[in-house]
């Protein structure tokens, strides 16, 4: 099986190996996007546990942006300079919730 179209043909079943590859690729893309925004640590408190870091829309609008595109697309847009990098930063979940 090579992709999403194949998976749809057999009732949305995606083999575990394929899911594992997608998760690894998503993690790499997310890490690179965060590096572009200043590194894999909270820009407010310095916390560096990657599993709790999030990309923050400095001027708000994150929920609205999610309706238009998925996080995965935002990460790619950050890596490809399709968004203004100064409008984003990396925060831990706690700082992002307080923001």
Image (cartoon, rainbow, N blue to C red):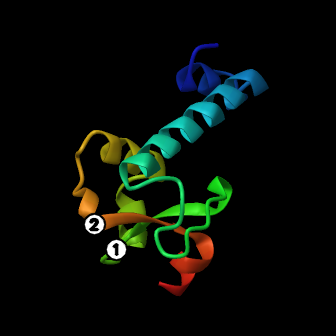
In this view, the residue in front, 34 or 78, is 34
Q: Is residue 19 above or below residue 81?
A: above
Residue extending furthest top? 1
Marks 2 & 1, CB-CB < 8 Å contact: yes
In this view, the residue in front, 57 or 14, is 57
Q: Residues within 10 Å of mark 1 (few under 14, many from 20)?
A: some
Question: Any mark on residue 21, and which?
Answer: none
Q: Which residue is mark 2?
A: 87
Q: Secondary structure at mark 2?
A: helix
Q: Quadrant of the N terminus?
A: top right
Residue at figure coordinates x 37%, y 55% from the top left: 37
Q: Residues within 10 Å of mark 2 (few under 14, many from 20)?
A: few
Q: Is residue 44 above or below residue 38?
A: below
- Residue 60 in picture, x, y percent from top left: 35, 77
Residue extending furthest bottom? 98
Residue at figure coordinates x 56%, y 26% from the top left: 4
In this view, the residue in front, 75 or 32, is 32
Left or right: where 68 falls relative to 31:
left
Q: Is residue 77 above or below residue 49?
A: above
- Residue 41 in picture, x, y percent from top left: 54, 60
| Nearer-N-terminus badge (2/1) | 1
Q: Secondary structure at mark 1?
A: loop
**How far is mark 2 from mark 1, CA to CA?**
5 Å
Residue at figure coordinates x 69%, y 30% from the top left: 19
- Residue 95 in picture, x, y percent from top left: 55, 79
Left or right: where 16 falls relative to 72:
right
Question: Any mark on residue 58, and which?
Answer: 1
Residue extending furthest right? 16
Residue extending furthest front? 46
Residue at figure coordinates x 31%, y 45% from the top left: 77
- Residue 65 in picture, x, y percent from top left: 36, 64
């Amino acid at each position: 099986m090579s992709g999403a179209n194949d998976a749809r043909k057999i009732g949305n079943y995606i083999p575990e190996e394929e899911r594992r590859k997608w998760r690894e690729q998503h993690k790499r893309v997310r890490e690179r996007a965060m590096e572009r925004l200043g590194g894999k640590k909270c820009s407010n408190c310095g916390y560096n546990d990657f599993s709790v870091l999030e990309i923050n829309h400095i001027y708000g609008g994150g929920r609205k942006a999610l309706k238009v595109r998925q996080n995965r697309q935002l990460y790619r847009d950050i890596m490809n300079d399709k968004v203004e990098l100064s409008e984003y930063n990396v925060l831990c979940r706690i700082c992002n919730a307080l923001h």
